[in-house]
Every structure is written in C-alpha cells, then in structure tokens.
Image: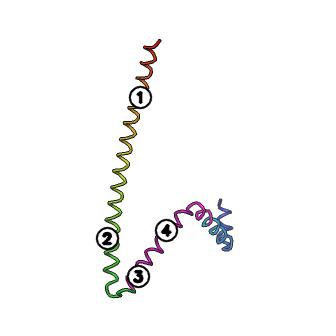
Amino acid sequence: MISILDYLSSHPLAVMAVAFVILLIVYFIFKQLIKLALLLLLVALAVGGYYYFKDPHKAPENILQTIKDTRTKSEKLVETGRKAYQKTKDVYKKSEELSKEAKEFITKKGEKKE
C-alpha cells in the first residue's frame, strides 16, 4: 500500500489518470442525477437571466420571490403526494380485507355443497 502511494506521489500523470478513472466511474454511477442537476442549473440560470434582462434593478427581488413561490408550491405538492400515498395504502388494506372475506365466503360456500 505504501509503495502505491509513493508511486502516485512521484508520478503526477498517474494521479491524473486515477482521478480521471474515478470521475468516470462516479459519472456512470450518478449519470441520471448529474443530468437532473445540470437541467435544474440550466433552468435556474434561464429564470435568473430572464429576470435580469427584464429589469436589472429588481432582478434580486424577483429571483427571491420565485424561489419562495417554488418552495411553497413544492411543499404543497409533497403534501398532496403524501395524502395520495396514504389513501392508496388505505385502499390496499381494504382490498386485502375484502379478498380475505371473499375467500372465506367461497370456502364456506364450497363446504356446504359437499
């Protein structure tokens, strides 16, 4: 292990190659996350540029207001998602209970015929 570190410290080209390989591995692992982050950065720059070119003096106020609006709307969206998840969970539990009751009813009905 020490010999590897000595080799890397004396050969900066090898360090760059190892760093490149590590970055390449991280890129392929987090490819979708990186695309999403770049897309969000692009959207943020577009919104900021729009407000800056529209009125340079009010741009910081408009950007802060847009961030606040986005935060409140995303909180509402998350809350709606939680409610929908809970409703789906409740419906699933009720359907399980109904299927158990139906199974019991069918088995009892079959036992009476015999």
Q: Where, quadrant-wise, is the N terminus in this rendering?
A: bottom right
Residue 22, quarter of picture: bottom right
Which structural element holds mark 3? Answer: helix
Count numbered badges in the picture: 4
Q: Are marks 3 and 1 in contact (CB under 8 Å)?
A: no
Along the line of sight, the residue nearer the viewer: 57 or 94: 94
Q: Quick one: label 4 or label 2, which is nearer the N terminus?
A: 4
Q: Which mark is residue 50?
A: 3
Q: Gap in Å between the C-alphas at discs 3 and 4?
A: 20 Å
| Tag shown at residue 68 | 2
* Measured Cα–Cα span from mark 4 to mark 2: 20 Å
Q: Residues within 10 Å of mark 2 (few under 14, many from 20)?
A: few
Mark 3 against mark 1, which lies toward the viewer?
1
Q: Position of residue 35 (x, y in %)?
A: 53, 67
Identify the residue under disc 1.
100
Residue nearest the observer in this picture, 94 or 67: 94
State the residue at coordinates (68%, 70%).
14
**Label 2 or label 1, whichever comes before in sequence order:** 2
Q: Which badge, 3 or 4, comes first in the chain's sequence?
A: 4
CA–CA distance in space, label 1 to label 4? 46 Å
Which numbered dot is residue 37? Answer: 4
Q: Residue at x 35, y 63 (%)?
A: 74
In space, the residues marked 2 and 3 are separated at their CA atoms by 17 Å
The reply to whether callout 2 and callout 3 are in contact (CB within 8 Å) is: no
Q: CA distance from mark 2 to mark 1?
A: 48 Å
- Labels 3 & 4 near each other (Cβ < 8 A): no
Sequence-first disc among 3 and 1: 3
Element type at mark 1: helix
- Image: magenta residue range: 24-52
Residue at 45% from the left image edge and 14% from the top image edge: 113
Q: Amino acid at mark 4?
A: Ala
Tag 2: residue type?
A: Lys
